[in-house]
Image (tube, coloured by chain):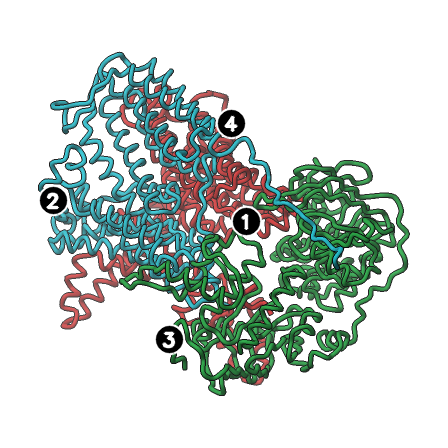
Amino acid sequence: MTTEAPAKKEAEKPEEESFLSVFTRNLWSSNTVTVTFLSIVLAFVIGAVLIVVSDSEVLEKFAYFTARPGDALTASWQLISTAYSDLLKGAFGDPEAFSAWFAGTGTWQDAFSPISETLTYAAPLVFTGLSVALAFRGGLFNIGAQGQAVIGCITAGVAGFTFGLPIVLNLVVAIVAGAIGGALWGFIPGILKARTGAHEVITTIMLNYTAALFLSWLVLQKGIQDPERTDAISKAVAESAKLPSFGGVLRVHMGILLAVAVTAGVAWLLNRSSFGFELRAVGANQHAAKTAGISVAKTYALLMAVAGGLAGLGGATQVLGTAYALTPSVAGNIGFDGLLVALLGRNKPWGTLWAALLFGALRAGGNRMQSYSGISLELVTVLQALIVIFIAAPALVKAIFRLRATRLVRPGASLAKG
Amino acid sequence: MSTATVEEIGEVTAPEPFWTRQRRLGVALVLIGVLAAVLFGSLAPSEAARFTLSEDAEGAALSINGQFGAILFGIVTIITGGLLFTSFAKRYQNLLLSLGILTFVLSFLCWQVAGKFLPLVDTTSGTLQLALPLILGALAGVLGERSGVVNVAIEGQFLMGAFAGALVGTMATSVWVGLISAAVGGVIIAAILAVLSIRYLVDQTVVGIVLNLFALGVTGFLYERLMQNDASKYNEPPRLPEWRIPGLADIPVVGTVLFDTNLLVWVALGLVVLIHFGLTRTRWGLRTRAVGEHPTAADTVGIRVRGLRYMNVLLGGVVAGLGGAYFTLVATGSFTKNMTAGAGFIALAALIFGRFTPFGALGAALFFGFAQKLATYLSAVGSPVPSQFLNMLPYIATIIAVAGLVGRVRAPAADGVPYIKS
Amino acid sequence: MKSLSWPYRIREIPLKLELRGITKRFGDLVANDHIDITVEPGEVHALLGENGAGKSTLMNQLYGLLQPDEGQILVNDEPLVFRSPRDAIAAGIGMVHQHFMLVPVFTVAENIALGSEETRGGPLGWLDRRRSRRDVIETSERYGLPVDPDALVEDLPVGAQQRVEIVKALTRDVDLLILDEPTAVLTPQETQELLAVMRSLTAMGKSIVFITHKLKEVKAIADRITVVRRGKIVGTASPDTSEEELAALMVGRAVSLEVSKTPAEPGRSVLKLSGLVVDDDRGVRAVDGVDLEVRAGEVLGIAGVQGNGQTELVEAVMGLRELRAGTVELDNESLATLSTKRILRAGVGYVPEDRSHDGVVKEFSIAENLILDMYDRPPFGNAFKIDLGSVGTNAKERVEQFDIRCMSPDNAVGTLSGGNQQKVVVAREMSRPLRLLIASQPTRGVDVGSIEFIHGRIIHERDQGTAVLVVSSELDEVVGLADRIAVMYRGRVLAIVSPDTPREELGLLMAGITGNAREEETE
């Protein structure tokens, strides 16, 4: 209905346009949804090109392209379609697995394992994504989600194998420890920004690497390292500190539920709470906020601590939900991925949740694509980066698809004073 | 109005606060000096610390008793700190600061090397080699940021340069083609950065970070698809030859380091000088700085702000791409996934720590390179000091620098601000 | 067009400029609507109009920074297209912008050379600094505009920076100089000097387009006056036209510069400043020992050229700037250690001077802006959450009460006109019981209708028994509103006088000149 109403209005114009053309025009010129969709399409197209140019067999067929173009095109199409259908199957489910389940020859667990994988990969990204998104709304670019997640991994992991508390309590303590660890690591750039004006982009980048080096040192220390191993891995967290999951092939764990709850919490914090009002005011115009009595410094410090805490939760989810032990790469790339997730979600809490799910799906599908079609998982990184590049430059996407440009009237254009 | 008087108001100058930058630095130096003299001095065994002039334990060496040296140099650090604090020699502030840090490092070395030896040539040339990509990366940053475009994609440019250099270098079996391709690889990332941030006004930090991931993905993907399948066809580039300049190369230590080495060293050092004089003494430099400080002012005198920014970012891409070539054509001879491992961010740190100037970047890069070299040395000799903490040094030093704890770093005024011509 | 070579080039034909039907639109806004202007050689042509009338937009097109949507620019009857300032400069047109186009960290010589550098060749162009310096000194001597080529621009006072801008234009050998609001930041004395420079330039055959909204200066210097209103030319006038007529042309109807009000009935002393010392952002003393008192039920106006410490004074009172010495008391309680939030809560209303910078959050809705400083106070909310219901009710009431013209209170404030944005700020600050109201430049960049409304609200607030402090660089505004006037000059209050004091005397005070016959204080 919502797209129909304006369309009808338009249709009353004397130019006698067909409903369909008006509808498509409105769809094309409408912003976020179209741009997001087209960005994903574009990224997949470029990904397909990469797949083809990196396949020597198909490339050989292109050598006699002018003679028999069919060969090259068919081979390319086959390569791409198997790769991407594996991606989809790995992300959302394989129809064959479902029919096997219905026919009784397969288990429901197998049928649902792709979804489970998607949710498993998405869970930590929701937290790191929210961390970046929340900071962004307060005018801070938290590139440090990675480092905060690493510290969150450390504190959650160490709490998980140290205290030996009873069930439930042990898990709660470990999760809270993760959040506190991340919050402290986030507080450093926050307080530096508040006190000295040090740019958070620089300090958080530097703190990321500091955290990573600290972790790689820590896992080799006595009391942390698994006494039965010589490589860089810590003791495993206690059973009671693990996030409950289905077990077996279904790795999905409580973390995703926690993620949804935290998304709701962040949405409330942002839009309904006094702190949310403060941080949005500071983010949009810190001078006006300061003049209205809002302490910019306090807001920055607190905001970075909260953002760090969210990223720390992401790290905790990773350790307590999937990894179960600390290694130098335990946090993977969840902080940097969280950055992309936040950008894709346009720094809105629920948008971030959806973006994290998309990224989780890509990652889960990418695993299947790698093992079935032999296409490197790195393609997923490329796709993710490309999607965000296009999202960030909507004008570019529109130019590529020749969309009607929504005219940008820039307020405060520097010289048009009057 | 003969009776009118102009109110005489003398120039009011705010009284200088007691805790000047110099005083704070002085206190800091005294503190680390005490740490060096007491802690390093007490930990160091009373054995000879030998700094050999050759590549190994043999031959001529500078030798000092480790414990004595640690205490001696620690005391010198304390003295320089004291001199800074008392404002005794205001003019030589930077000299004193450098001396203080140098003696602190020497004190640390005396402790660590006591009873062992440190080959000076190896350390110096290792420092320079490790600093090489950092110098080039930081120079790329200088070019972009002085014209107002933030470049956090140095890491991505490194990766792309390293990858392109290895791939094309192997396919063409020519290191020179590889070198040029590395530059082109850097330019590709730079071009995306430039178009998105200058033309499409996307936040420059966002673009940079995303481009790093993009480069990581693309090179990793193609590495796994192409190079891993057939390394001899795609991933065995010829290495950059080492040239020895007769005569000059015979100077002890410096000769071997500077004149018996690869071309990239000379390119990097030459670029430092070139960009320094370019920025300060030429029309291009004046305009670049104007565009980075006040683009509207530059526009009103007819300078093409965006054009100049495009040019500088792309030139930066060339330089960073050459920095990437170091990894495959100089250091290792093959590409591996994510082989730069954060070097681009250390280059960024060197850029900031070097206050956005070419020579500052050079100094910072050498300092960071030394820290890395020392980290490998220490873990090789089984030092109790964990190498990870030495590797943290560039990052922590940069945080201290931007936080203004040791004098604030001032970025160009329009750095990161897109120029919107209405 | 230009045949002779640098630097001793003298144009054979003096420059005659003609604008024909220049039209410029920004979205739906028509900034310039078919403007026709002719500037004869050697004349000072004043372009008079309110803020936002479209004067600067017009000149930016003439200078090649913007391109007209319609119309033609003719120089000596030859139509020209200026794609960039370079083209305009080549045609002999120079401009001194209201906000100086100088790179603060460059020297004067570097700033002047920028864009047309003297080089010794080479692929990058090796700078010839000696020649650049010499050119600066030469031009500065030729036109009697002293500048130091080696000084850093950021260290220079505004008057000197303006000279640098003029020299910068003149070294490019221009014949027509556009001066955009050149006197806004100058003291009356500096203004006189500038007018003298303008006279000597026209005597040398240069023509000047003088953009301003100050009637007295126009009358003092212009040969011809073109009045612009809302993007259109509404009339031309000669310098003999009276100020009242010019003002009427400028704003569209006869305006009373007077504010109607009854005599004040001052009560207790509410705000008391003594020995106040404040530094500016660069650590230079801005307020240097100010004693002031504002009483309940009176308006104290602070007059002075902008940049004489008024901004810092107000910010210090509001807790936005650190005090270096002295005390600030509200009803005998010190404000010095309180945060801005506590000061606002103590019953102080504050209309900041720079609306879009400090007054409103443009991305926020009108409703949100209306609670910007009371968001965590009942009825709007508490320390944890905000009550959206009461925020909405409040917004509806204020929009009606303060006549804020908008589609809906949920629209972003950035979509409103300047006057309506200011009304949002005024509505926010004057909708709670106040002991003290501080209004800085309350009507800057505001349309005439809103000015009257805002002035009325300020007087209304005074009549309620609030102590009011008004800071304005528009002398007319201060004289109209204030019951007592404090004149600030270089961080000090030179005198406190009655609004009946003759203008000339106020002008001299603003220039820092005190007659010894004057009383320190007039009641």
Q: Are marks 3 and 2 in contact (CB under 8 Å)?
A: no
Tell me the mark number nearer the camera, choosing from 3 and 2.
3
Q: Secondary structure at mark 4?
A: helix
Q: Secondary structure at mark 2?
A: strand
The subunit carrying tag 2 is: B
Q: Quadrant of the N terminus of chain B?
A: bottom right
Residue type highlighted by circle 4: Val
Residue type highlighted by circle 2: Trp
Image coords of residue C180 (percent x, y): 58, 68
Tell me the mark number nearer the camera, choosing from 1 and 2.
2
Residue identifier under label 4: A173
Residue A261: quarter of image: top right
Residue type highlighted by circle 3: Ser
| B361 left or right, relative to C441 | left
Tell me the mark number nearer the camera, choosing from 3 and 1.
3
The colour chain A appears in is red
Q: Are marks 4 and 3 in contact (CB under 8 Å)?
A: no
Residue identifier under label 2: B243
Image coords of residue A289 (percent x, y): 63, 48
How far is mark 1 from mark 2, CA to CA?
54 Å
Q: Secondary structure at mark 3?
A: loop
Let me know if marks 4 and 1 both belong to one chain.
Answer: yes
Q: Secondary structure at mark 1?
A: helix
* Colour green, chain: C
The colour chain B appears in is cyan
Residue C338: quarter of image: top right
